[in-house]
Image (cartoon, helix red, strand yellow):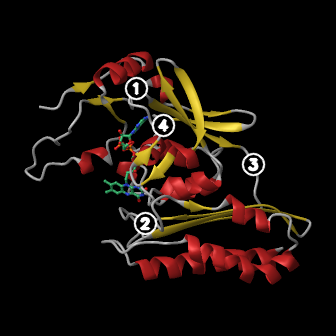
Amino acid sequence: MVKTFHPRTLEEALKIRKDEKAIPLAGGTDLMVRFRSWAGTQPDFPWPVMFINHLSEIRYIDIQPKEIRIGAGATLSEVEQCSEVPKVLRTAVSQMAAPALRNLGTVAGNICNASPAGDTISVLYALNARVELTSLHGARQISIMEFISGPGRKDLGDDEIMTAVMIPIESFTHTLYRKVGTRKANALSKLSFCGLAKIKAGRIDDIRLSFGAVGPTVVRSVETEKKLIGLSIEKLKELYSEIRPDYVAMVQPIDDQRSTAVYRKQVSLNLLDQYIESLTMES
Ligand SMILES: Cc1cc2nc3c(=O)[nH]c(=O)nc-3n(C[C@H](O)[C@H](O)[C@H](O)COP(=O)(O)OP(=O)(O)OC[C@H]3O[C@@H](n4cnc5c(N)ncnc54)[C@H](O)[C@@H]3O)c2cc1C
């Protein structure tokens, strides 16, 4: 018999998390599948489960002067429909699962599942998102890149709940999100790519490139991006062939039931090439 909790407030939830080590269940769209029982009976959870998506303290999207705060209880549909959320993230969310699942699932759940194929994660890496983790002792914030350390591995204390995701408000001149899956709905990514760039007066002011499902975590290299920042478009054309090998080395996918390593690597690099070419053509 699974022990379940239905706290009335965030504070009560944090107390249950600390005392009972109950695992948070937001939409349950990952958790219910991971622990499903093939016999059609209740899922077999190894820990107590705590429902959190009804908590009003975390069910919001707040637009502040410098950042957007997405409460951990906000559903994927709410994020998709909020026009202030960066379009590139709404595009990624709109391609996740199917509408009924998006009415339940959350961005925080996608992050905490810590799958390298999580569709919001590659975009949130590129957007320099941060996450807020709260316990009875207070809240701390860390970057999403620090939070996730491997498939299913994350820096979440056993007394903590993720309470929000923060996205800096910035503008980009060239944004691209591409998901490659088997079909349009209810298909996890074979791979994904996100490119964000700010080009001013023919020069790269900022560029961020991230790849999903091609390594143990989303792949993004701030160091390699630094080699591109400040270049004129003419120089980018000249130097890209010298920088591309960094990505050839970094993109190291595996074979699994969804795709092959060879396909994932080739298509990821094709998307990178196309994105870089689009910068050189449009600017
Ligand atoms: C048919 C189907 C299709 C899918 N398609 C896609 C897809 O296209 N792309 C994609 O990326 N994913 C997909 N998913 C996976 C899933 O829907 C998403 O990852 C979703 O965002 C998970 O959110 P959730 O709120 O349901 O998470 P839950 O299942 O509630 O939780 C997932 C994990 O996060 C933890 N967690 C949740 N909230 C918190 C919190 N606030 N603090 C701490 N820990 C927390 C849980 O304990 C659990 O470990 C699909 C799933 C199904 C069943």
Disc 2/disc 4 C-alpha distance (Å): 22 Å
Q: Earlier in the sequence, mark 3 or mark 2?
A: 3
Q: Amino acid at mark 3?
A: Glu
* Depicted 115 relative to depicted 2: above or below: below
Residue type highlighted by circle 1: Asp
Identified by mark 4, the residue type is Ala
Q: CA distance from mark 4 to mark 1?
A: 21 Å
- Mark 2 or 4: in front is 2
Looking at the rendered structure, the kind of residue marked 2 is Ser
Q: Which residue is mark 4?
A: 74
Instruction: State the SS at label 4.
Output: loop
Mark positioned earlier in the residue sequence (1 or 3) = 1
Spatial CA distance of label 4 from label 3 is 22 Å
Which residue does the numbered mark 2 point to in the structure image?
Answer: 189
**Classed neighbour count for the residue bearing mark 4: other residues with Cα under 10 Å, few (<14), some (14–19), many (≥20):** many
Disc ID at residue 48 = none
Q: Earlier in the sequence, mark 2 or mark 4?
A: 4
Mark 3 — residue? Answer: 170
